[in-house]
Amino acid sequence: MSIFGRTSVIFDLDGTLVDSEPNYYAAQREMLAEHGVDYTWAENEQYVGISTQETLAIWKDRYGIGEPVDELLADLDRRYLALARAETHVFPEMRKFVEQLHGAGVPMAVASGSSRAAIEAILSGTGLDAHLTTVVSADEVAHGKPAPDVFLAAAALIGADPADCVVMEDAAPGATAAHAAGMRCIAIPYVAAHADAPAFASAGLLLRGGQAEFTAQAAWDHLAALTRP
């Protein structure tokens, strides 16, 4: 057992561990342009935290795209992975936090709305797979965030009680999912304007300034406070 007792930590990937949104946006904009859609960054912010599969289903209806979701997902993954393999930025304090947790023997998992192929490519390309070996994609559960399914599946894989899990999240749907799963949450909003979203009000620690405010030490101290007798 770690110094934090039975506490386990479950990380969202995109916008939390890594700044993948610019690559996703570039891939999405490129794909949608081929369907005659001029997709903007402001529009993209509406989908932060929603699984890729669910986003594509919305686009099919909104933009009248004929291809099946699974074909669109394969197309988007291909475009995204080409960009992600070239460069994906890991938030330095998040890498430090992961390394500290690993060193302390704290069980960890990644639960993401991205496809498994995208998750594994990012973890491998950034070296995070050395410490984060348990992965769940929203594609592998019945419902993506804000449903709790992906977090509950991750907890089951690492043998953790949901009440003992702390979720690291950047998006309101993820914070909602953590709360629905009966888990605590450290929220680091990727989009600053979303910091006032009601979903973040339930977070045990809300860093309104996002990654600019997050430090491994602050997160470590929060876990320590949660497990203090």
Image: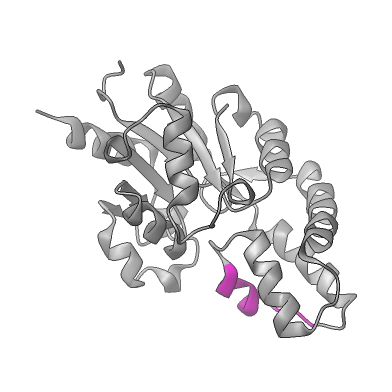
Rendered location of residue 51, percent (x, y): 60, 59
Rendered position, 18 above or below 9: below
The single residue placed furthest to the left in the displayed view is 229
Q: In which quarter of the image is residue 206?
A: bottom left
Rendered location of residue 165, percent (x, y): 33, 38
Q: Nearer the viewer, residue 31 or 116?
A: 116
Q: Which of 53 and 46 is in front in this view?
A: 53
Q: What's drawn in magenta, residue-wise?
A: 38-47
User: Taking the image as drawn, is residue 84 in sight?
Assistant: yes
Q: Which of 150 and 170 is in front in this view?
A: 150
Is 24 displayed left or right of 152 in the figure? Answer: right
Is 171 displayed left or right of 20 in the figure? Answer: left
User: Taking the image as drawn, is residue 93 in sight?
Assistant: no
Rendered location of residue 187, percent (x, y): 37, 54
At horizontal 46% and vertical 52% (from top left) the residue drawn is 211
The single residue placed furthest to the front in the displayed view is 142
Q: Quadrant of residue 194?
A: bottom left
At horizontal 44% and vertical 74% (from top left) the residue drawn is 193
Which of the image's four quarters has the C terminus? top left
Residue 89 on the magenta span:
no
Rendered location of residue 11, percent (x, y): 47, 42
